[in-house]
Image: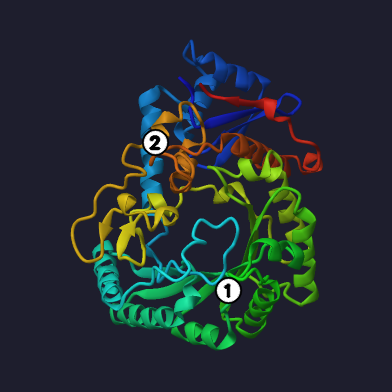
Amino acid sequence: MRLSRYVIAYRDVRAGEHVLYDVVADRYVGLDDAGLAAVDRWRDAPPAPGSEGEAAEALAGMGFVVHDDAADAERLRGALAGAARGMAGTAYVTLMPTLACDLSCSYCIQKDHETKGHMRPEVEEAALAWIERALEGSGAGRLVVHYIGGEPLTRKDYVLRTARRLAARCRAQGRTFSWELTTNGVSLDLPFARALAAVAPGSIKVTIDGDRETHDEVRVFRDGRGSFDRVFLAMAAVARECPEIQVRVGGNFRAGQERSFERLLDRMVSEGLAGRVESVRFKPVVADGGCGAACGAGGADTLVQLGRATVARGLAPRMPGSIDEVVPCELHWERSWVIDPAGLVYKCLAVAGRPELAIGDVRGGALRPDPLTARRPWESCGDCPFVPVCLGGCLGGRAATGAEPGTVMCQRPAFEARFLEQVTGRYLEEFHPEDAASDVPPPAAIDHAA
């Protein structure tokens, strides 16, 4: 009997008090010195009869300790099955009407698609018919369509037309429909937002990369002009005038840009947007297979700093980046697909437009296994306890930067720091609120089960 491979022991969270955290079930338990020593001893000898045996039985029942590798393999199979279910009762389709974009952002992998890549009418019809068949076959009671590009608002007609058709089909079948739209904001306006909101509930995410100076260095028109004023004003207008739409603000930072993003937050507050946006979430620019290439070791610290600044200004109810959000992405969901402008079907948006990584075509034919996951790359991750929630990291993003499909993008160091802070913080807040503000143990205090 031993600790599960997916359980982390945080030693001395308080003097003589230790925490076991189960990544699979997202729960923790506290042990004293004798309890932790007993768990360590069970590797070589069975639990002593009496109270120790009862404790072992209780910990095994909760999944903190296992009898053998087969038990851990079963725990991982359960986690994979949970990931495959995705959003409860929901089919999730990412629909790309175009690869074209009216900006030429310096870090964007799609910046070269200026005028090509629109979905043709016959492909549009085939795509809608495919979605309708997939929805019926999935048994889902809800359809969510995420419009993205390229820039989807270069095809406003497409977005409105397809949303209306799919919403009507869902209503006729007793299903619900909602939409999401990710945009650079350049072509966002109130008439369009109101027209789309009239179709069904939905959300609009607008990308703003810091204050005017920083944003206008990277998010530029084809002629080099900055886009900040146009984008910010459009976002603010929708947030104020369309309360039925969830407005989300995203942004991509590089090392040293913390103050620029804090100035953006100040501008949002001064414009009266506190309480009018559903979320504000910034992330590092991804380059060469991971955020470390662009942000160095400060990437995680910047995320925490900007998250705290967002909450302090009343622009978000809680810190973004919670460990509760570390879950397998849509790539692993059974009822999730991406359709590119050519009508090819993928499991991951990051590789859309690369036919060799497609799993099918909306015009017919069976879907093939996804090349990103077919070889189960997470099985190469050894004893990493985060495998059940990570499953190899951003496999699509790794392939998009030139790596062989199915190559792991390891985020273990970032996870270790993030889980250490939040798990121990939650434990102290629940059981020792008087100590909750104290410093947590250093990363060296993490003890991974072998």
Q: Residue at x 51, y 14 (%)?
A: 48
Tag 2: residue type?
Pro
Q: For residue 279, say whether it is visible.
A: yes
Instruction: Determine whether 71 is above or below 80 in the image.
Output: above
Q: Residues within 10 Å of mark 2 (few under 14, many from 20)?
A: some
148 sits left or right of 13 in the view: left
Which three-letter amino acid code belongs to the residue tagged 1? Gln
Residue 175 position, x and y percent, is: 34, 74
Of helix, strand and loop, which one carries label 1?
strand
Q: Is residue 48 above or below residue 273?
A: above
* Residue positioned 51% across, 16% down in the render: 42
Q: Which of the labelled discs sits on residue 246, or is there none?
A: 1
The quarter of the displayed image where residue 27 is located: top right
Quadrant of image for the N terminus: top left
Residue 316 in view here: no
Are discs 1 and 2 less than 8 Å apart at CB?
Answer: no
The residue shown at (77%, 44%) is 433
Among the 4 quarters of the image, the one containing residue 11: top right
Cα separation, mark 1 vs mark 2, equals 36 Å
- The image position of residue 244, as x and y in percent, is 57, 81
| Residue tagged 2 | 377
Is label 2 in a helix, a strand or a loop?
helix
Please tell me which residue lies in front, 379 or 17: 379
Most extreme residue toward the front is: 223
Q: Position of residue 109 (x, y in %)?
A: 51, 56
Query: Relative to 274, does residue 420 appear above or below in the rendering?
Result: above
Of residues 414 and 402, the one nearer the viewer is 402
| Residue at x 36% of width, y 45% of height | 81
Q: Earlier in the sequence, mark 1 or mark 2?
A: 1
